[in-house]
């Protein structure tokens, strides 16, 4: 089942990526020769018009083969209007960019669907007050419900925590609901040192409360859900880009990189946790695939876009030899990265670590 979950997840994500390239090519008048999910020998195939649609043996990728994209390919003059290489630079860039863009779009659609379906969320009711804490000194007790912070309405714990943590040492005005009455009080979150998801030390505000176990299903109407879905996707894109920067800065150790084994494991866990978790993880993977493909590495979509930019600035394409050398360097880099990720996965298994968080 682990393999099936992973193949389903990767299949959908890769399909959308290649669909972006395919549709952009068709819109641009480029002839598509093959649309393949997976690499290697074809297992199942069907031909419609000029295009052969394939499911191939290795389900860790896919490709769209376009007419005239191979360097040095001889194209008869009457066929050049269907050739990728004979299209304007802007058209080629549009086709290449559409793959990563469709991955981002898929994530936005998934998040929008999740918000329409509804997300279980802890209410803003306080379940426990720490002895001697700022909250206890302010008079808060278990069962109190925080309904406003600085005049802004809150109803879930996820809305409460960020506002408190972002205000260390600052006075906050809270509106509290207690049984049948409401009242306001002022509280100053205590500054505390902690570490963020990248292991960097930061300062946050704490008042010493924990949530109750009461939950609500938070649903949005379709218009709100679509807007929130795109906002959430933007946040994930930003976090993904920031993670790449932190990896380059060595703030995040390279040992945290994961490969197919980690993806398979998390796919299984998320599927077992329910459809919402599975599709949310799919959205994260889709964003990661889109962003990583836009990195300026030869052989990736981002590398092709850089070459198109150079072509636009020079007024002519790079030589076939230069492109071949660049792609070999890019391929070598991708292989090394894949080997490192696979090595990290294997070492976690050997050491008996939880592949998700590195703990035994």
Image (spheres, helix red, strand yellow):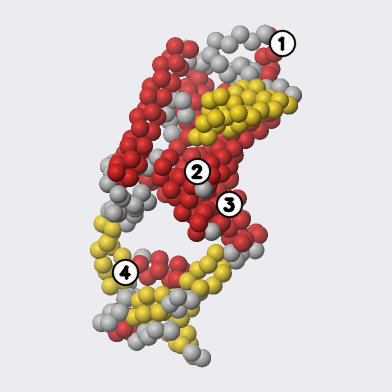
Q: Residue at x 60, y 23 (%)?
A: 65
Q: Residues within 10 Å of mark 1 (few under 14, many from 20)?
A: few
Q: Secondary structure at mark 3?
A: helix
Measured Cα–Cα span from mark 3 to mark 1: 43 Å
What residue did someone put label 3 on?
Answer: 110
Taking depth in this image into account, of 13 and 225 the one nearest to the observer is 13
Mark nearest the camera among 3 and 4 is 3
Q: Residues within 10 Å of mark 2 (few under 14, many from 20)?
A: some
What residue did someone put label 4 on?
Answer: 205
What residue did someone put label 2 on?
Answer: 3
Q: Quadrant of residue 227?
A: bottom right
Q: Quadrant of residue 136?
A: bottom left
Q: Residue at x 45, y 78 (%)?
A: 125
Work out whether mark 3 precedes mark 4 in sequence or the reverse, and give the earlier one: 3
Q: Residues within 10 Å of mark 3 (few under 14, many from 20)?
A: many
Q: Secondary structure at mark 2?
A: helix
Q: Secondary structure at mark 1?
A: helix
Q: Is residue 246 visible?
A: no
Q: Residue at x 45, y 37 (%)?
A: 292
Measured Cα–Cα span from mark 4 to mark 1: 69 Å
Work out whether mark 3 precedes mark 1 in sequence or the reverse, and give the earlier one: 1
Measured Cα–Cα span from mark 3 to mark 4: 33 Å
Q: Position of residue 191 (x, y in %)?
A: 27, 69
Work out whether mark 4 precedes mark 2 in sequence or the reverse, and give the earlier one: 2
Q: Residue at x 48, y 89 (%)?
A: 179
Q: Secondary structure at mark 4?
A: strand
Q: How many marks?
A: 4
Work out whether mark 1 precedes mark 2 in sequence or the reverse, and give the earlier one: 2
């Amino acid at each position: 089942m682990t393999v099936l979950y992973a193949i389903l997840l990767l299949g959908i994500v890769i399909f959308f990526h290649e669909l972006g390239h395919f549709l952009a090519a068709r819109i641009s008048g480029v002839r598509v020769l093959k649309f393949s999910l997976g690499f290697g020998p074809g297992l199942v195939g069907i031909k419609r018009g000029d295009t052969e649609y394939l499911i191939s043996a290795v389900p860790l990728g896919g490709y769209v083969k376009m007419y005239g994209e191979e360097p040095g390919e001889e194209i008869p003059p009457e066929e050049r209007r269907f050739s990728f290489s004979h299209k304007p630079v802007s058209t080629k860039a549009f086709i290449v960019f559409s793959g990563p863009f469709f991955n981002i779009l898929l994530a936005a659609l998934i998040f929008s669907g999740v918000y329409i379906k509804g997300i279980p969320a802890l209410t803003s009711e306080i379940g426990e007050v720490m002895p001697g804490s700022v909250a206890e000194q302010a008079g808060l007790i278990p069962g109190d419900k925080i309904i406003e912070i600085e005049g802004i309405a809150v109803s879930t714990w996820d809305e409460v925590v960020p506002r408190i943590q972002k205000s260390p040492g600052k006075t906050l005005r809270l509106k509290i609901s207690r049984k049948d009455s409401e009242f306001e009080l002022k509280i100053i979150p205590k500054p505390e040192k902690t570490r963020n998801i990248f292991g960097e030390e930061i300062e946050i505000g704490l008042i010493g409360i924990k949530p109750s176990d009461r939950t609500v299903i938070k649903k949005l109407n379709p218009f709100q859900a679509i807007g929130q879905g795109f906002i959430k996707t933007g946040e994930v894109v930003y976090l993904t880009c920031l993670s790449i920067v932190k990896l380059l800065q060595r703030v995040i150790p390279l040992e945290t990189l994961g490969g197919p084994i980690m993806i398979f494991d998390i796919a299984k866990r998320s599927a077992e946790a329910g459809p919402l978790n599975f599709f949310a993880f799919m959205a994260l993977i889709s964003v990661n695939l889109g962003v990583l493909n836009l990195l300026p590495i030869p052989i990736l979509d981002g590398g092709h876009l850089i070459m198109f930019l150079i072509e636009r600035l020079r007024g002519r394409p790079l030589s076939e030899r230069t492109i071949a050398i660049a792609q070999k360097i890019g391929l070598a880099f991708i292989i090394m990265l894949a080997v490192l990720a696979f090595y990290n996965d294997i070492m976690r298994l050997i050491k008996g670590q939880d592949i998700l968080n590195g703990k035994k």
